[in-house]
Image (tube, grey):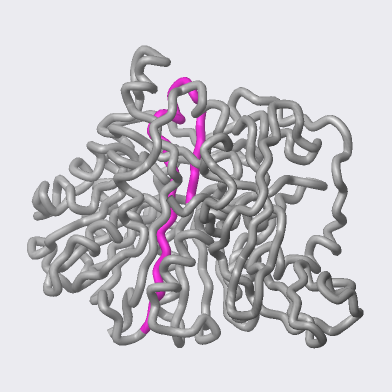
Amino acid sequence: MRGIAAAGAYVPRFRLSADELADAWGTSHASGVERKAVPSADEDALTMAVAAAERALDAAALDRVELTLAAAATTTPPLEEGELVPRLVRALDLPASAATATETGHTAAGAAALSRALDADGPALVVAADCPEGDPAEADHPFGAGAAAFVVADDAAAPVADAAWHTDETPGVRFRERGDGDVQGLDITTYQRDAVRGAVTEAVSALDVDPDGADAAAVHQPDGRFPYRATGDLPLSNEAVAAGTVVDRVGDAGAATVPLGLLAALDGAGDGDLTLAVPYGGGTAAAFAVEGSLSVAGIDDLDGGTEIDYATYLRERGYVVSGEVSGGGAHVSLPNWRRSLDQRYRLVAGKCPECGGVTFPPEGACQSCHARVEFEAFEAPRTGTIRALTVIGQGGAPPEFAELQQRDGAYAVAVVALEGEDGTATLPAQITDADPESVAVGDEVRATVRRIYEQEGVPRYGVKFEPTE
């Protein structure tokens, strides 16, 4: 039976506690949320999708060239108009012939992406990644971040036994005005609760399984109390709902919350267990009945993280910085940037056929023998060692990195050596996810795709390195 063959989860390392938030505002509008995940200044829906997908693909027993579909779901794409999935395909080195789909605009977008994958011929990749934001004084309080990725295939470890839908118009429950980055709602509590509960009940009741036998249920969860209220008309135990609830630990991650809850439930399930996934958004509730269990790479991220204070939170999310950049910086034209994507995403280096030396990027003359040759391309290892290091202090960043520094403070830049069977590639790169004073020459680091900077209105992405410990 077709279903989930492998999965990966990713949650950003920063965490903001409900107590810290309440101390800042005198109250917290995040019922049942004990702490929430906070994306770093160089993270967004795309970078989190790449991180979760890498984990899922590494756990899958297939070659990436076999994938026939890549589908992504988010309510916070990096650009309001501009496809996310082609960047995902390039960063993950997926086949250019794979069909693509981007689902957005509502928190049940992950259900639409998963449904496409279940209907596809051949293995498919589905990623739900999100980082919603709102008015810091109120609407933003529960919002977190995270990503969940699924490799969907036949004869899967966690087959999807059935799926059902229910759609009705429910204006004002949750929306974002055109051109506005803030999520809003009309806060008509009873209307919202009844609308969602009715849709959830109808979708689950249409499944060809008995919900009374469900061992776990990941249900629409904008806060910690809502999933229990949304299932009030269904024969689901509180223990089953709790098994699929993650909003208390990572916050409301939009389209990614229920997928993360489903992965948490599957990772803790038994071989014969039944898990329901019931996202809701934009008037649509979907219900999936998933059987069995699955080991999920990265699921421990749900309970990890580094605590930050509220002031740091405001800076990381860009609420209190101007983002204005003085000067033009090092302009790299988009055509030139595009030509270097294989190096920026996948660390493609070149081996000299004359002397065997390695050149990165693989352009021009060999860095060892200086011969003009046709390099033999190969992917350098994604784990390496810091050979040299410096810290760019406040105000010392080139103009294109000024916004990052406003939000994240000083950052480290290192020369990293990537030693592999084909030789050693050496390159300069930023260090992320670490106090710049805590890293040193000799430390082991691994590559991660992050946002580099924005130029000409287009966000640009590439490899940075994070400490392995």
Q: Nearer the viewer, residue 74 or 310?
A: 310
Name the residue located 72 percent from the left edge and 80 percent from the top edge.
377
Residue 25 in the image, given as x and y percentages of width and height: 41, 15
Q: Quadrant of the N terminus?
A: bottom left
Q: Is residue 55 left or right of residue 391?
A: left
Q: Nearer the viewer, residue 73 or 386?
A: 386
Name the residue located 59 percent from the left edge and 39 percent from the top edge.
41
Q: Is residue 27 left or right of residue 53?
A: left
Residue 254 shows in the view: no
Residue 190 in the image, given as x and y percentages of width and height: 27, 32
Residue 108 shows in the view: yes
In this rendering, is residue 23 above or below 394? Answer: above
Name the residue located 28 percent from the left edge and 39 percent from the top edge.
248
In this rendering, is residue 249 above or below 365? Answer: above
Name the residue located 60 percent from the left edge and 53 percent from the top edge.
386
The magenta segment is: 130-153
Query: Magenta stretch: residue 290 in it?
Result: no
Residue 215 in the image, given as x and y percentages of width and height: 12, 61
Residue 262 in the image, given as x and y percentages of width and height: 28, 59
In this rendering, is residue 77 above or below 226? Answer: below
Q: Is residue 280 left or right of residue 198?
A: right
